[in-house]
């Protein structure tokens, strides 16, 4: 059990969530050498993680060039891994696992995986989870080699340097108007349109927060989303425009993380940014897409500062009667049903109890 490879590609939230496996492995096997296969754009959330010994980048060119892919797979074979844990469990990671020739190969059950892996598991569906199904289904993959976890509620973590945190704090101080105010990061967009709360609805919620609390708000968005940002700002009230510091550009993902670390809370779409807030122990309020499972991704829901709302919360489970495929296909339609008036009360509680540490709430004017 000298060398262990974990594979988790694609989305930042997935890559970050799977880092908790490394902490458990290091606790159990301190001398093991742990490797992580990830996509390049997710590297910032794992940089500096003391539980990961080596990071292997699966480059985009491997998808389009069979020769490059083969060379990469042969490099995996040369490592002679003892264990492979494939969290991703798709064609690319199946090939990596196959070429590894590891004696122990662990992943999820699919109709073909029982012939490729030595241990396969079906996802658990217990809704009474306290850590979230996304966490439980990952921890399950450790069971063939760790019979009982020492700290089963261990959460994913992001490791920033003091230099990064201080530089971000100094950058924020340049905006003198924010001194002494609560600072919030606003997640304007999800990773796709069908994971993004409509901008005109989000503007109503932000206008409400700014009217009642006057926080300083920073915006999280990609450079190619400037047009949508301008649209959002056009929907903002004069009071909200005073609160929103649109001129502050986060730049790199590491810089965004350092700025987020200096914030008092995160509000916005559920996804990578909300998971990063959790990993930095920043109180967060997430708005779920109608087709994403809240049971899976409302992780560590016993911690009050991890709060979230889902359309299904207000339809008394009726949304679950509609297939995930249909909800995903018609996500924009279901989003239109998720009006801000449904969310305001919970958002008010979050602001009072987590950001301002008040026990008494205010009246919401619709």
Image: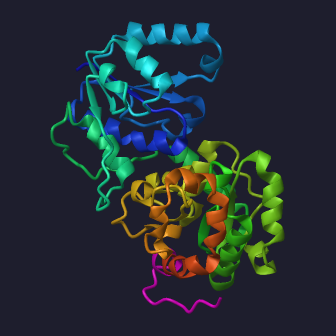
Residue 95 is covered by the magenta coloring: no
User: Which residue corresponds to the image point at 49% horizontal and 24% vertical from the top-left?
Assistant: 91
Q: Magenta span covers which residues? A: 351-366
Q: Nearer the viewer, residue 130 or 356?
A: 130
Measured along the vertical axis of the image, is residue 269 above or below residue 21? below
Instruction: Tell me: 120 left or right of 202.
Output: left
Q: Position of residue 274 (x, y in %)?
A: 53, 56
User: Which residue corresponds to the image point at 39% horizontal and 15% vertical from the top-left?
Assistant: 98
Measured along the vertical axis of the image, is residue 27 above or below residue 249? above
Instruction: Tell me: 106 left or right of 76.
Output: left
Measured along the vertical axis of the image, is residue 251 above or below residue 342? above
Measured along the vertical axis of the image, is residue 349 above or below residue 99? below
User: Which residue corresponds to the image point at 58% horizontal and 29% vertical from the top-left?
Assistant: 40
Could one spot residue 362 in this view of the protein?
yes
Number of numbered discs: 0
Q: Position of residue 50 (x, y in %)?
A: 38, 35
Residue 365 is covered by the magenta coloring: yes
- For the N terminus, the quadrant is top left
Instruction: Tell me: 168 left or right of 77.
Output: right
- For the C terminus, the quadrant is bottom right
Q: Position of residue 270 (x, y in %)?
A: 54, 58
Q: Quadrant of residue 248?
A: bottom right
Could one spot residue 309 in this view of the protein?
no
């Amino acid at each position: 059990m000298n060398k262990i490879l974990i594979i988790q590609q694609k989305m930042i939230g997935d890559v970050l969530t799977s880092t908790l496996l490394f902490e458990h492995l290091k606790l159990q096997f301190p001398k093991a050498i742990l490797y992580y296969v990830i996509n390049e754009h997710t590297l910032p959330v794992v940089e500096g993680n003391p539980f990961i010994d080596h990071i292997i980048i699966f480059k985009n060119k491997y998808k389009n060039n069979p020769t490059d892919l083969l060379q990469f797979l042969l490099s995996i074979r040369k490592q002679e891994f003892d264990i492979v844990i494939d969290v991703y469990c798709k064609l690319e990671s199946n090939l990596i696992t196959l070429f590894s020739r590891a004696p122990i190969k662990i992943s999820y059950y699919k109709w073909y995986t029982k012939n490729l892996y030595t241990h396969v598991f079906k996802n658990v569906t217990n809704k009474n989870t306290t850590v979230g199904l996304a966490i439980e289904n990952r921890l399950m993959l450790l069971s063939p080699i760790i019979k009982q976890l020492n700290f089963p509620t261990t959460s994913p973590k992001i490791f920033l340097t003091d230099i990064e945190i201080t530089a971000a704090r100094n950058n924020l101080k340049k905006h003198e108007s924010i001194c002494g105010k609560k600072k919030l990061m606003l997640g304007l967009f999800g990773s796709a349109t069908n994971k993004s709360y409509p901008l005109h609805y989000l503007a109503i919620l932000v206008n409400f927060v700014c009217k009642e609390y006057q926080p300083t708000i920073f915006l999280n968005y990609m450079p190619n989303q400037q047009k949508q940002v301008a649209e959002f700002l056009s929907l903002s009230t004069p009071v909200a425009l005073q609160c929103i510091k649109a001129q502050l550009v986060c730049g790199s993902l590491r810089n965004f993380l350092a700025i987020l670390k200096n914030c008092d809370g995160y509000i916005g779409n559920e996804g990578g940014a909300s998971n990063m807030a959790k990993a930095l122990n920043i109180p967060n309020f997430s708005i779920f897409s109608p087709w994403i499972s809240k049971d899976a991704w409302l992780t560590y829901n016993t911690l009050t500062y991890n709060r979230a709302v889902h359309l299904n919360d207000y339809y008394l489970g009726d949304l679950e009667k509609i297939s995930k495929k249909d909800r995903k296909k018609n996500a924009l339609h279901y989003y239109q049903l998720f009006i801000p008036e449904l969310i305001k009360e919970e958002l008010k509680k979050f602001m009072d109890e987590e950001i301002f540490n008040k026990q008494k709430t205010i009246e919401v004017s619709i």
